[in-house]
């Protein structure tokens, strides 16, 4: 089944024409309505008329996460606030959130993309889906939710947290599909095993995303639960989950490129790269009204394949991610930068900026421990004071990172045993196939 | 009038305590007495040593988290009820004893190290109740 055959199976020529027309409109729009882009284009001696087709996209300036931060919160919007119907936010590198905004049509396009992806995973309106991403500022919960409603699924907004209740409902309701992070699904699988209800479940499909996972982990999930597991990709700056998803052939994730034009560029020179070459993934939001972005650098490293897929779709496929070109970590689906930890620690009086982040996966759930060196000005001869200090640091980190953090106090200089000054992260999660 | 107590932060893992005693031994510093407060991950060692300033300096030079703070040391009679008399004195004066440990104990007499919520008030209350406070130099050379 294909949700929107006209778009998803369009010939390459037709698609290029449509993208060209949309790009021209987009460039004219940002030139006239977003000062940031007008200035950038003027500095490059570029006018909207210079963009005649999709092939001219390489003339356009790039956009980075820093640009979003510098224009916090609404500086890059192309429409007045009165036309915005929803806002989402993700944590930023320096404590300030990255804010994204949607018009009603943006939300509709997002729902359309998610519906296409769900159908790509074999889900139909007959399915009942539990959405077990966090609901709120994070795009995961609401993004999947409205996509599933758009398709017509019976949608259960579980959010995250009470896994036993989730499994109980899965059994009682006869849930057939679930959307959540892959690590959370592995945790759910364990709870299912503990509760001994596996044989009574009707679950057959999982749509997982918001954190990097390997093909091996996908197969492990499929085997453990006896289901099909699919990879859905997205990032809030561009839209949210739904930008790309893998079909039943699992040969890369189909990009919804009538809405999001994907390029792969060399991460140093920013030159375009050919199909199959690994580089940084860059998106241009062809149809976005609220927060349109030209050539947004995702920092995700991958390659692209424009050849038609066995499933019949002609949309290009990006391969599973090969890594990041910056130091961002994804922990429990949340973007975390080491610099956030540093900033938060420096704000606590007396705390040294010497820290080490240890990311691990315990019982299939990501954990973050932050080790902080304790110097003589900081520690107390009373344990209750030490416990207060630990709580204070942990609360500060939690509010900066938006995830639970275990703080461990260590002796001074002990962190140096991890070679190199800039070594602030140890990621013990095994993500290699 | 107050005693300088040496406090050191330690991770709760093998060899850390040994490292501290090693540094002190090498520098000819005697540990008169000590008390260790620990959690599963870390501990704080509190000590009365023969030369507090020097001990702090040598430990810091070796990269340890060490500093000094003030505590009271009180001579106690070696008989039933003497500790109770001390705790009652502090309670009556609204002073919280954060922790205490033995400085010295023999057949005829003893002495305790005391950390009070307010050291000045603690000192005054002990004096008023007729307790004999240990002279710092005497304590360091026990
Ligand atoms: Zn396909």
Image (tube, coloured by chain):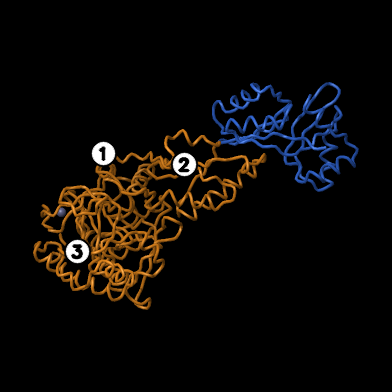
Q: Residue A39 sits in which quadrant?
A: bottom left
Location of mark 2 (residue):
A356
The residue lying at 22 percent from left, 53 percent from top is: A265
Rendering quarter of residue A196: top left
**Figure label count:** 3
- Mark 1 belongs to which subunit? A
Distance in Å between CA atoms under marks 2 and 3: 41 Å
Disc 3 crowd, CA 10 A, few/some/many (<14, 14-19, 20+) = some
Q: Is residue A169 above or below residue A29?
A: above
**CB atoms at circles 2 and 3 under 8 Å apart?**
no
Q: Is residue A329 left or right of residue A153?
A: right
Looking at the rendered structure, which numbered label has been put on residue B77? none
**Element type at marker 1?**
loop
- To which chain does the residue with label 3 belong? A
For the residues marked 1 and 2, what is the alpha-carbon distance in whole angstroms?
26 Å
Label 1 crowd bin: few (<14), some (14–19), many (20+), radius 10 Å:
few
| Chain identifier of the orange chain | A
Q: Name the residue tied to disc 1.
A: A433
In this rendering, the answer to whether A418 lies above or below A107 is: above
Q: Which residue is mark 3?
A: A57
- Residue B78, percent from left and from top: 85, 27
Identify which residue, A252 or A111, lies in the foreground.
A252
């Amino acid at each position: 089944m294909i949700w929107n055959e006209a778009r998803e199976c369009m010939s390459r020529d037709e698609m290029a024409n449509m993208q060209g027309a949309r790009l021209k409109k987009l460039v004219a729009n940002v030139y006239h309505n977003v000062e940031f882009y007008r200035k950038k284009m003027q500095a490059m001696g570029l006018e909207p008329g210079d963009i005649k087709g999709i092939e001219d996209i390489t003339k356009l300036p790039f956009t980075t996460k820093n640009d979003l931060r510098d224009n916090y919160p609404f500086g890059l919007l192309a429409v007045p606030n009165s036309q915005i119907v929803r806002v989402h936010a993700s944590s930023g590198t320096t404590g300030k959130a990255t804010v994204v905004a949607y018009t009603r049509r943006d939300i509709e396009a997002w729902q359309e993309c998610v519906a296409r992806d769900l159908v790509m995973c074999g889900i139909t309106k007959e399915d009942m889906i539990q959405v077990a991403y966090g609901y709120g500022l994070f795009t995961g919960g609401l993004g999947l939710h409205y996509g599933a409603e758009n398709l017509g699924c019976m949608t259960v907004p579980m959010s995250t947290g009470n896994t036993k209740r989730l499994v109980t409902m899965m059994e009682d309701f006869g849930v057939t599909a679930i959307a959540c992070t892959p690590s959370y699904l592995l945790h759910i699988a364990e709870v299912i095993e503990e509760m001994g209800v596996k044989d009574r479940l009707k679950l057959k499909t999982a749509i997982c995303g918001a954190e990097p996972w390997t093909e091996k982990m996908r197969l492990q999930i499929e085997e453990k639960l006896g289901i099909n597991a699919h990879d859905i990709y997205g990032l809030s700056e561009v839209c949210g989950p739904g930008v790309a998803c893998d079909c039943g052939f699992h040969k890369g994730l189909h990009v919804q490129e009538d809405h999001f034009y994907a390029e792969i560029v060399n991460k140093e020179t920013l030159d375009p790269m050919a199909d199959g070459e690994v580089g940084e993934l860059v998106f241009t939001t062809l149809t976005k009204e609220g927060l349109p972005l030209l050539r947004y650098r995702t920092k995700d490293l991958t390659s692209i394949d424009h050849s038609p897929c066995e499933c019949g779709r002609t949309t290009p496929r990006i391969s599973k991610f090969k890594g990041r070109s910056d130091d961002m970590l994804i922990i429990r689906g949340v973007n975390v930068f080491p610099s956030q930890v540093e900033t938060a620690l420096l704000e606590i009086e007396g705390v040294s900026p010497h820290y080490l982040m240890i990311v691990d996966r315990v019982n299939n759930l990501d954990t973050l421990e932050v080790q902080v060196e304790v110097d003589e000005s900081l520690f107390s001869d009373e344990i209750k004071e030490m416990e207060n200090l630990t709580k204070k640091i942990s609360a500060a980190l939690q509010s900066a990172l938006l995830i639970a953090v275990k703080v461990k106090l260590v002796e001074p200089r002990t962190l140096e045993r991890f070679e190199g000054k800039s070594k602030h992260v140890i990621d013990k999660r095994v993500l290699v196939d | 009038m107050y005693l300088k107590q040496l406090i050191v932060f330690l991770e709760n893992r093998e060899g850390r305590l040994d490292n501290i005693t090693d540094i002190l031994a090498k520098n000819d510093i005697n540990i008169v007495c000590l008390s260790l407060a620990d959690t599963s991950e870390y501990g704080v060692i509190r000590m009365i040593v023969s030369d507090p300033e020097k001990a702090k300096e040598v430990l810091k030079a070796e990269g340890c988290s060490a500093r000094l703070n003030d505590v009271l040391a009180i001579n106690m009679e070696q008989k039933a009820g003497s500790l109770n008399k001390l705790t009652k004195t502090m309670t009556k004066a609204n002073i919280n004893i954060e922790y205490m440990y033995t400085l010295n104990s023999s057949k005829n007499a003893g002495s305790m190290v005391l950390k009070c919520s307010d050291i000045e008030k603690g000192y005054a209350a002990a004096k008023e109740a007729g307790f004999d406070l240990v002279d710092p130099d005497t304590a360091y050379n026990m």
